[in-house]
Amino acid sequence: MPLFGRYLLVGFANTILGFAVIVVCYAALGFSAIAANAAGYAVGFVVSFFLNRTYTFRSKVRAQSGFVRFALAALVGYCVNLLVLSVAKDLFGFGVYISQALSILSYLGTVFLISKWFVFGDSARSTGDRV
């Protein structure tokens, strides 16, 4: 499977897992909606890091330093997401749903590229995996 395909597969699995954690926390454990969302996001984020490290990028980067870089990649991706959303909606006048779709794609692409070259850069140099 191509590298970006593995990345998308991990993202899909991570989304399902995060949602499952939200449902369990909210429905079974009595968490508030915000607390359940935070728990689902936190679990999903940690799982995403480890799956991307081991499966997607097959990296040997140290967990501690890689995790910090992964968090920075997510932060940059979110900022790009907001920028694209604002520009698409407010400057170009696209509808909300089109703007949201473009912003999601920008997040995926940004975090993928930062992950490939900065977070898990050891694998990009050693494996020669193509996008």
Image (spheres, grey):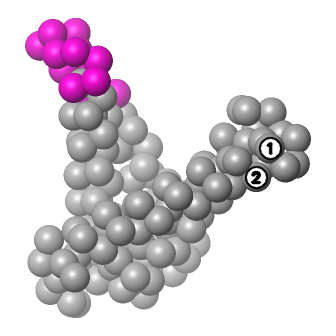
For marks 2 and 1, give the CA distance. Answer: 5 Å
How far across and how far down the image is residue 100, in percent?
A: 30, 28
In front: 20, or 74? 20
- The structure residue drawn at horizontal position 59% and vertical position 54%, both measured from the top left corner, is 18
Q: Hey, which quadrant is residue 36 in on the image?
A: top right
Does residue 36 lie above or below 119 as drawn? above
Q: Under tag 1, what secondary structure?
A: helix
Dot 1: within a 10 Å radius of its alpha carbon, few (fewer than 14), some, or many (20 or more) residues? Answer: few
How far across and how far down the image is residue 4, in percent?
A: 22, 68
Q: Amino acid at mark 1?
A: Ala
Does residue 70 lie above or below 125 as drawn? above
Q: Is residue 30 left or right of residue 74?
A: right
Residue wearing tag 1 = 27
- The structure residue drawn at horizontal position 40% and vertical position 82%, both measured from the top left corner, is 55
Q: Under tag 2, what secondary structure?
A: helix
Q: Is residue 88 left or right of residue 45?
A: left
Q: Quick check: is 86 in the magenta stretch?
A: yes
Residue wearing tag 2 = 24
Q: Magenta region: which residues?
A: 82-98
Main SS, magenta residues = helix
Marks 2 and 1 in Cβ contact (< 8 Å): yes
- The structure residue drawn at horizontal position 40% and vertical position 61%, both measured from the top left corner, is 11
